[in-house]
Image (cartoon, helix red, strand yellow):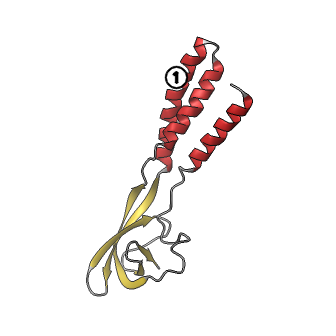
Amino acid sequence: MKPLLSLTLITAIAATLSGCVVAPNSGSVYSARQAQNEQTVRMATVESVREVTIDKGNSGTGTLSGAALGGLAGAAVGGGRGSIATGIVGAVAGGMIGNKVESDISKGKGVEITVRLDNGDLRAIVQDADEPFRAGERVRLLSDGRKTRVTH
């Protein structure tokens, strides 16, 4: 493979992998769009906290990128028809590894926080486990009409 073509392909694969980055579900992280938007604030008391796993799903870019890199690496090993066979094996192995890596990256620790609002209603909110919550403590629920986050 020509050096310029290899460099172009590797750059394209790196750009694709950067798309694997997943957005946080933290009570403390705001996107630029969320900044300076008014939110409704309700006070509540934590009833219970349960650890959960947040799965943000696979986009397929890990599999495709891994297959492309594996195919390149495999094709570079053999010569002639051997390079085709090793390229195929490399692509399959790379795809499997890339899928596993993306799957691991897309899962994170979360908490399901069940709260009792001051009016007596119960609500449960799931968010990243980046802030500790305990039963009995007072918290704020911040809501923009679509998303709700729990904060101290």
Q: Secondary structure at mark 1?
A: helix
Q: From this viewpoint, which residue is outermost toward the right?
A: 3
What residue appears at the point 71 percent right and 27 percent down from the top-left corner? 2
What residue appears at the point 50 percent right and 33 percent down from the top-left corner? 95
| Foreground of the two, 9 or 23 | 9
Q: Is residue 100 left or right of residue 17?
A: left
Q: From this viewpoint, which residue is outermost toward the bottom?
A: 119
Image quarter (top left, top right, bottom left or bottom right) of the N terminus: top right
Q: Is residue 113 left or right of residue 97?
A: left
Please identify the quarter of the rendering in which residue 3 is found.
top right
Label 1 neighbour load within 10 Å: few <14, some 14-19, many 20+? some
Q: Amino acid at mark 1?
A: Val
What residue appears at the point 51 percent right and 43 percent down from the top-left corner? 61
Up/down of 92 relative to 78, above or below: below
**How many labels sit on residues?**
1
Residue that carries the numbered disc 1 in the rendered image: 89
User: In the image, residue 53 lies at what x, y percent?
Assistant: 40, 56
User: In the image, residue 87 lies at what x, y percent?
Assistant: 57, 22
Up/down of 18 relative to 111, above or below: above
| Foreground of the two, 128 or 31 | 31
User: In the image, residue 68 lies at what x, y percent?
Assistant: 56, 33
What residue appears at the point 48 percent right and 33 percent down from the top-left corner? 96
Please identify the quarter of the rendering in which residue 49 is found.
bottom left
